[in-house]
Image: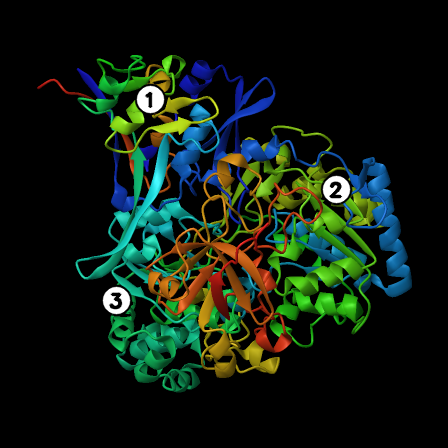
Amino acid sequence: MIVEAIRIDHQACWGCKTCEVACKQENRAADGVKLIAVQEEGPEIIDGKLNFVFHVNLCRHCDEPPCVDACPDAAIRKRSDRIVVMDSEMCTGCQACIEACPYDAIDFDPDKSIAQKCNLCHHRIENRLIPACADNICPAHCIHFLCYDSAPS
Amino acid sequence: MTDFKYSNVEKEMATYGFDRVVKSHCRMCHGGCGVLVYMRNGKIAKIAGDPDCPINHGTLCSKGLASTQLVYHPDRLTHPVRSVGSRGNGQWEQISWDEALDCIAERILAYKADFGAESIVMGYGTGRENEGVIYRFANLLGSPNVLTAGHFCYGPRIATSIITCGTNPIVDYENHPQCIMVWGNNLVISNPDCYKAEPFSVSLAKGAKLIAVDPRLTRIAARADVWLQPRPGTDAALALGMLNVIVNEELYDKQFVKDHVHGWEPFVQRVNEYPLKKVEKITWVAREKIREAARLFATTKPAAVQWGVAIEQQINCADNDRLLMALMGLTGNIDVPGGQVLFSTPKIRNVGYFCAHRMLPDVQREKRLGGDRFRLAGNFAIINPKCVWDAILEEKPYAVKMLFFISSNPLVTRANAKEVYRALEKVDFIAVSDFFMTPTAELADIVLPAASWLEMDYIADYWKRHGYIFPRRKVVQVGKCRSDHEMLNDLAHRVGQGDHWWDNFEQALDWILEPMGITWQDFKQMDYLRGEVINQKYKFKGFSTPSRKFELYASLLEQWGYDPLPQYREPPESPYSTPERFKNYPYILITGRRSPGFFHTENRQIPWLRELHRDPIVEIHPRTAKKENITEGDWVVIESVRGKVRQRAKLFEGMDPRVVSAEHAWWFPEKKGPAHGWDESNINILTDNAYETCDPAMGATSVRTLLCRICPEPEGGGS
């Protein structure tokens, strides 16, 4: 089975938010709605040293996604290629998925009253293009698209 | 970089139905990056990085990606306008280009006849690669007065490097430094010249040691092997302390010093005036840390100093730059691969020549505002802004009658904003060329609609020092917008400079490229050109300085009446220089912390960028916030002796509790009406521009370090 995922090297992230805008350019989420979000964590003392990191947050495309079970409208499904896709057309805005997501990775568009999340640019993947945030846009090279065959060799 | 060469152009085109893709070169900041502009039905549909560009290798930043929203912004000025009624009342009428340029030309000729060409001040901000045409126009007009950010941004690096080693030493990321000392710079999110975040990141990934010098815990500081956290404004003392270690522990390159350094003995005497005990007291940095950083930097080869603007916006501007160059030079890292290289541009007519400085008559050059006071600046055609405001308000040493600001918003970006406002209000005539009606443009008589980088042909990075030039290719026309280059080429003909300009600006590009034996049309077919890279050129031709050596002891500064050796001066406003004031203004305020998406006053109306950062943010240490009764997200009043503004509190532990960090360049395009909230959060309401607080040689205003007090904004205090 072909498995697709985003791997992020948080230690390398500078917090420049280029990925957020690359996502906007591709997916045109409404103002204030983020499918990918760069968050600051810290500062805190780690090993006797003041430290902080940036954390790039987006849908993890979980193996057993709680949002799929939570959605009463079956607007979210786990595909065979493991991408968790939300169909905004089917969303009624109940926000159960937002409650269910353990990663705070689903946002809400109050104007359209729909939930929004990263669909791993599946429209790009299906055309053999890399998701917008991972298509060598990040100046830190910290966002990578992994596409590999999970079958034992 | 083959690992990262994604972006499948053919599949992008097929998948999205783009009809063409154009390679060009971004100019959303002070540097440039290679881009691919995808077009559909004649409009820009998508912007991506160019994987083949040696500067960014396919990556980009938020600003570059959002350029489409700049080009097609509904508030974009798309035709010339003239103020109706009293200036600054927000009433405008649309006029033709001919009317606009004839009116400006008529004013220029009249002021020149009545008050001399020096009464006309041209200006740009950080420049949209229009620097060459603006200087050319002013010089040919006979005005020695071009008001730029050059007194405290990049200009000092150019001026001090020319007098020290001939040209600006650039970190050679392509050959991967083994140690990078990032000094007061956050290049990964800011707007650096030449190389940017990508090659820096790659050098770190390849294992370069990292030293960070910053009063704030940036992510670079957090990742650093050594983080030095100095008291703001004490960089010169810190550098002298590091040099003291390097000299006294004999960690310097002895052969380089013996053969290529001018002024070694007096320089050693000077650094010996800064023992670590004294430096620790001045800088608040523990002496062990200073020693550790100095040793790491001096013993790792090759090493480089990534420098930037922060150290230039201080009273020690020129000496800060010179001391960092001393660190580069003494450690043998000048002009070596992976160190700091003195790159050559291709064999074209260079930007200095294009500027036509030699066409300015001596008698006019002598009238340069502040030229006798700030002699380093004056010798590099740079002026201090207060000299212009004084010439308007007090008509000393003569009256300035006209301001022509091209991509500049001085009401928000220059120190002592209230004085700037009074000057703009009083001056006879103001013309502005810009993308939007900025607070400065709102005070003008005529505003011209400027073209963005996507709407012009130009030789990108013409003024950069990495040795590359790239074709910037026009992809769209928006309204009646014109590039500043075409506009000034046209205006030049209307004021009698036609002999020195061209029928159209493409001919100017041909003229620049002519020594290479190519035309603009030829260059447009290329990806880039680079000057030949030759290292350690000083070994056979010396440095391009009066002594032909690396001048630690600056003979030109001595000739101009300054201390030829770098020294530390206490910031003009500090706990030690103004202890009485410190009792009432008990925090050190640092300003100008960068945030992704903005380039000084630009981009606050661009949705994808404003979304990254909605409000002006003041960072306050949690302990300080508690003491001042401030909580996260509160609007806070920040006040200096000169005025007060409001920004929103963010509690941040990554600073000394005695330091408060405010943002600069805020105005609010969403607030309609001519003011656009220019004085609400603009930190330059608080900054000082008195001559004695400026760098004595460069005229840099000391906007980065001052004293303030803070309190929560009272109920109903905002707008």
- Horizontally, residue A98 falls left or right of residue B51, namely left
Quadrant location of the N terminus of chain B in the rendered image: top left
Neighbour tally class for label 2: few under 14, some 14-19, many 20 plus, Cα within 10 Å: many
Q: What element carries label 1?
A: loop
Q: Which mark is residue B448?
A: 2
- Horizontally, residue B238 falls left or right of residue B368, namely left
For the residues beneath circles 3 and 1, the answer to whether they share a chain is no
Q: Which mark is residue B296?
A: 3
Q: How far apart are labels 3 and 1 at the CA level?
A: 46 Å
- Horizontally, residue A69 falls left or right of residue B403, namely left
Type of residue at label 2?
A: Leu
The residue tagged 1 is: A119
Answer above or below: position of B286 versus B161.
Answer: below
Which quadrant holds residue B326?
bottom left
Q: In this figure, what is the number of numbered marks?
A: 3
Q: Can the viewer see residue B541?
A: no
Q: Earlier in the sequence, mark 3 or mark 2?
A: 3
For the residues beneath circles 1 and 2, the answer to whether they share a chain is no
Tell me residue B471's x, y (percent). 56, 37
Residue at mark 1: chain: A
